[in-house]
Image: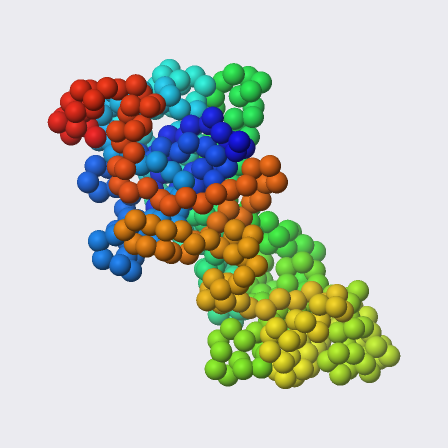
Amino acid sequence: MKALDGVRILDMTHVQSGPTCTQLLAWFGADVIKVERPGKGDATRSQLRDIPDVDSLYFTMLNHNKRSVTLNTKGERGKAIFTQLIESCDVLVENFAPGALDRMGFSWERIQEINPRIIYASVKGFGPGPYEDCKVYENVAQCTGGGASTTGFPEGPPVVSGAQIGDSGTGLHLALGIVTALFQRETTGRGQRVECAMQDGVLNLCRVKLRDQQRLMHGPLKEYPQYPHGTFGDATPRAGNASGGGQPGWIVKCKGWETDPDAYLYIIAQAAAFNGLAKVVGHEDWLEDPDWNSAEARLPKIDQMFDEIEKWTMTKTKFEAMEILNPLNVPCGPVLSMKELSEEPSLRATGTVVEVDHPERGVYLTVGNPIKLSDSPAEVRRSPLLGEHTDEVLKQVLGMDDEAIAAAKADGAV
C-alpha cells in the first residue's frame, strides 16, 4: 500500500510548476489523471526535443506515474465528461492563467456544487494585489520573489538561480497544501481552495534574505563580503558565494580548475572546526595570533583567509580535499556537475537518480522522489503517451460503455 492509495487527482496542469506537484503525489500512490488537449497535449511534449517526434525529456521527467486522458472541454459533451471527472476525484490541480477555468464555466463555486469534498488547488504567479493578473514564468518568479536581487556578486547584475525555485519550488509548496487539505477533510468532510503564488513561494525560499533586510536596519551585515571595506545600501545586497548562515563560507579553486569548470570546493570556516582547518592548510600560526584566533577577529579578513585556504586546495582535487577536511568536521562539499551527479552510484542506489524505459525514446535518466518514506517506497514509472489511458479512465472511473466512448470520440470530445 502506498501513502496516497485511494486518492484520485484530476490533473489540469502543464509545463513545470503544476506537473511537479502532481508527479510528487503520484509517486506517493495517488491516481493522477492528466487531462490534455486532443492531438496536442501538454506543450512540453514537443518543447526542447532531443529526439525527433517523441515526447521530450522536459515532459517525461515531470509526468511519471500518471495516466493521460485527452479531453476537449470547449464542447458540451466534453464539459459533461469533465463534470463527471470532478465528481469522481478528490483533488483538482491547475496552473492556468488567472480566470481560465472560470471562463470555461467551472468557477470554484460551481466546482463545489459538483463535488463539495473536492480540493481545488492552483498555482498562480501572484497573490491578490496589483500583479495578480500577470503571467509568470520561472525567472520572472525569481525576480519578483527576491531571488534575483540577492543572487550574484556585489559588483554585478542580479542573477537567476539554476535551481527551478519558482516553478518546481512552488509545485512542492502546493503538494504540501493539498495533503494538508486532504487531512483536514477527514475532520470537516469538506473540500477547500489551496492556492500557491510563485512570488510567495520564492520569497519563502529567500526567508534568510528577508531576515538580513531587517538586520541591516541595525548595522552592517558582518558576514557579507562588503564588510568592512565596502558599503551597504538600504536593501539586502548580493553576496556572491558567501554563506547565508552566519558562518564564513566561500567557493575555492581546486587542482585542475584551469581546465575543469567544476574543480571547486565550498568550505565553511566554522568556528568550532577552525583549529583543524588552520592546521591542515599550513597556518597553525593563526591559532596563537589574536588577529586570527577568534571568529570576530577573522571577519574583516575573510577574503585573505580564503585566499590562504585556496592555496592549499589548489594542490588537491576537490574530492581529495573533502576527504581530508571531513574527518576534521570542516563543513565542505565539492561543486558537482550534472554529469557527475548522473553517474554517482549512491544516488542510483537510493532512487534519487533513476533509469526509466520509454516505449518511444528508450532508456533515459530522471530524478526520482527526493522524499523517502519507510512504509511507502516510491516506484518511478514512465510518463504516459498522449491519451494512452483515455478509454481506460472513461470505463473504469466514469463507467462509460464502448458506445458512449465512441460517441464522444465522434463528437471530438476525446
Residue 409 in the image: state x and y as whole percent: 16, 28
Residue 264 in the image: state x and y as whole percent: 57, 74
Q: Is residue 61 left or right of residue 100?
A: right
Q: In percent of the image, x 42 and y 28: which residue is there?
A: 8
Q: In percent of the image, x 24 and y 31: which residue is there?
A: 71
Q: Quadrant of residue 42?
A: top left
Q: In percent of the image, x 81 and y 70: which residue is there?
A: 294
Vertical relation: 301 (above or below) 131 = below
Vertical relation: 277 (above or below) 144 = below
Q: In percent of the image, x 22 and y 57: which residue is there?
A: 52
Residue 185 in the image: state x and y as whole percent: 53, 21
Residue 238 in the image: state x and y as whole percent: 55, 63
Q: Is residue 241 left or right of residue 285?
A: left
Question: Toward the viewer: 58 or 378?
Answer: 378
Tell me which colouring the rendered structure shows. rainbow
Vertical relation: 92 (above or below) 238 = above
Q: Quadrant of the C terminus?
A: top left
Q: Is residue 279 left or right of residue 352?
A: right
Q: Quadrant of residue 306?
A: bottom right
Q: Quadrant of residue 109?
A: top left
Q: How many marks?
A: 0
Question: Toward the viewer: 307 or 259?
Answer: 259
Question: Toward the viewer: 3 or 242?
Answer: 3
Q: Residue furthest right?
A: 288
Q: Is residue 244 visible?
A: yes
